[in-house]
Amino acid sequence: MALVDLGAVARNVGAVRSAVGPAEVMAVVKADAYGHGLVPVARAALAGGATWLGVAHVHEALALRAAGVEADVLAWILTPGTDLVPAVRAGVDLSVAAVWAVQAVVAAARAAGRRADVHLEVDTGMSRGGASPAEWPALLDVVARHVAAGDLRVRGTWAHFASADVPGDPSVPAQLAAFEAALATARDHGVDPGLRHHANSAAAFFVPAARYDLVRAGLAVYGLSPAPDRATGAELGLEPAMTLLARLAHVRRVPAGAGVSYGLTYTVPAATTLGLVPVGYGDGVPRHASWDGERSGEVLVGGARRRIAGRVCMDQVVVDLGDDAAEPGDVAVVFGPGRHGEATADDWAAAAGTISWEVVTRIGARVPRSYRETAAPAGTSVPERAGVCA
């Protein structure tokens, strides 16, 4: 079970707001709110003071609207052939970065019988999305014509950082300078840039000049540091919102020399007790966190961290409990805030050679979510047995 603390989500948004004010906060809830649950997290983020929600795809925005979420929503990845009429009708803001996208949005606006709201994306040096400096003037000219015709309203202009988490990276001031130039060009072409937004979570905390009118907070909403080498989540005033729990499904004693899991890559040096935790890579637990001869992901059982014995399987992992007593039904905490000694998403990221964004986002739909409104007070224990499911 993934236990999601919606109170922590709201407080995390509040922490971002305190850091960036008077800029507004867009809570990024794409990818099912980084695996935490799209609609519950969106509502908690708004309760915490976010004034915008951000998603990657139109269908995510429409899911918010279908759930009754009426806040401003921006969807920023458009692909040719996508039916944009429902989004325009639902009042979803759409990002455009090319002339074809403007034309598609205009066609949808005319079909919907209402003006479409857009944000203009400019590439300031990441070479991913956005109009390049060479494409930007032509895009602005097309946008200006359709604004004058009443088809469009420009509500924002935005870009994205490549390395805002890296102290002193020269790309950061270079991207800011490119953004300022793009804003000036927009005004020269008769286009009001609207809300200016360039900052992701890292820039929101570490690049004050990038805060502009609005920041897009992604990872920070979920309580994880966007730059753990610079500051921990706690140092930024953030609380991890997800705890991944399961119950031991099987406990067995094995003799010295027993091999464990696929490939028998883990051999117990002495008689030990093994516990079977019924979550695996089919649930999003990274296989790269398997035992590699030196380390692995760790699971909290009986108040102590237990290393994964062998490989992470699709549906299960085995943990080495040593000589400690355990029985089926005992709680295993895969990761959480770390308040009770459990591994964190950052710990699992280190074990798997990845990033905490991936650790939480990949927890799949097979894992049931349970929501609560506030974090457990510091010093309380994790649940022992009741109410915790695999």
Image: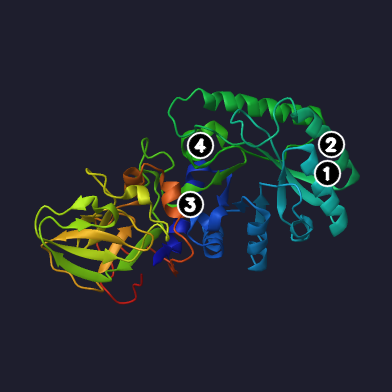
**Is disc 1 surrounded by few (<14), some (14 to 19) or many (20+) residues within 10 Å?**
some
Which one is in front, 211 or 168? 168
**Is disc 2 surrounded by few (<14), some (14 to 19) or many (20+) residues within 10 Å?**
some
Q: On the image, numbered disc 3 is attached to which residue? A: 221
Q: On the image, numbered disc 4 is attached to which residue? A: 203
Q: CA distance from mark 1 to mark 2?
A: 9 Å
Q: CA distance from mark 4 to mark 3?
A: 14 Å
Q: CA distance from mark 1 to mark 4?
A: 32 Å
Q: Residue at x 79, y 57 (%)?
A: 85
In the displayed structure, 239 sits above or below 250; it is above
Q: Secondary structure at mark 1?
A: helix
Give the side of residue 334 with respect to residue 107, left or right. Answer: left
Q: On the image, numbered disc 2 is attached to which residue? A: 142
Q: Are marks 1 and 4 in contact (CB under 8 Å)?
A: no
Q: Nearer the viewer, mark 1 or mark 2?
A: 1
Q: Nearer the viewer, mark 1 or mark 4?
A: 1
Q: Amino acid at mark 4?
A: Ala
- Percent of width and height locating residue 130: 67, 36
**Is disc 4 surrounded by few (<14), some (14 to 19) or many (20+) residues within 10 Å?**
many
Q: On the image, numbered disc 1 is attached to which residue? A: 103
Q: Secondary structure at mark 4?
A: helix
Q: Secondary structure at mark 3?
A: helix
- Percent of width and height locating residue 352: 35, 45
In the displayed structure, 209 sits above or below 100; it is above
Q: Are marks 3 and 1 in contact (CB under 8 Å)?
A: no
- Percent of width and height locating residue 316: 33, 62
Q: Amino acid at mark 1?
A: Gln
